[in-house]
Image (cartoon, grey):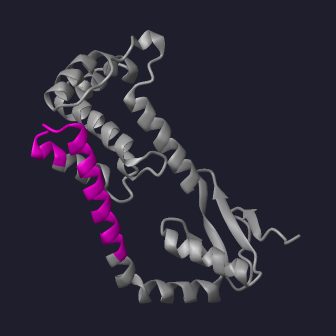
Amino acid sequence: MEPDLDCPTTPKTPMPEGYQFVPKGNSYVTQHCRTQAHAEGKPVYIVYGKEGRLGIRVPTSIYIKVLQEYDRTKANRARKSRLVDARLEEALGKSVKNQFYQIPPKDLREIVQRTTKRKSGRIGRSKKLDIAVRARLATYAHIRHRHTGYEKLLKKGVSRDVARYLVDRKINEIVRKWGGTKERLPSPNEHPESNCAVIDRVLQTDSAEST
């Protein structure tokens, strides 16, 4: 049985000799540092603070190698990222158009741009749902925030469930105008499984798995 090379620690614990702290935030650097350290049989110290996971401690030599590789492959990775983003934008845009064939071009562009933005945490980049569901939920959310009084209700202290219920009729009107269909939300007293609730749950799951 192979030893567990991931060791939890805290910022107050003295830094092991020859090690370097790598803060979280750059997934390429942290993931490659961790992978390379494991490959060399070196322990990786996972640093936790009051606010959660802060980063990792790995051998400085490995950290330097990963940074060099990061710089060397930066241009190529950027090209690949742009290609992936372009494909996602195209696929999501087509799906929105198929489901809401009379959607104004301006709204279509805004939905695609906002919901596919990299590192935004929005539904368009979720890996839990297929593209058709993502497109539909992103469109509902766009209508709710851009074409109803939902935001004003929230600012007045109305709860999210009640606010969603109150603007649901307006959402339905716009959805039908755009050529789509949407089921009416039940009363907030019935604990509605609204589209916003679906979005919240999916994004929370994605966020939890990415840490």
Question: In which quadrant of the rendered view does residue 55 lie?
Answer: bottom right
Instruction: Answer left or right for 102 relative to 197.
Output: left
Instruction: Answer left or right for 128 relative to 21.
Output: left
Name the one closer to the observer, 3 or 83: 83
* Residue 29 belongs to the span the image colors magenta: no
Name the one closer to the observer, 81 or 47: 81
Question: In which quadrant of the rendered view does residue 143 lie?
Answer: top left
Tell me if residue 182 comes above or below residue 59 in the rendering.
above
Tell me if residue 206 comes above or below residue 193 in the rendering.
below
Tell me if residue 53 comes above or below residue 193 in the rendering.
below
Q: x, y percentage for residue 1?
A: 89, 70
Q: x, y percentage for residue 12?
A: 70, 64
Asked if one can make out residue 20 in the rendered structure from this viewpoint, the answer is: no
Instruction: Answer left or right for 187 relative to 113.
Output: right
Residue at image location 53% in from the left, 75% down from the top: 29
Tell me if residue 48 comes above or below residue 82 in the rendering.
above
Name the one closer to the observer, 152 or 122: 122
Q: x, y percentage for residue 184?
A: 32, 17
Residue at image location 25% in from the left, 58% down from the top: 90
Tell me which segment is drawn in magenta. 80-108
* Residue 98 belongs to the span the image colors magenta: yes
Q: x, y percentage for residue 157?
A: 33, 20
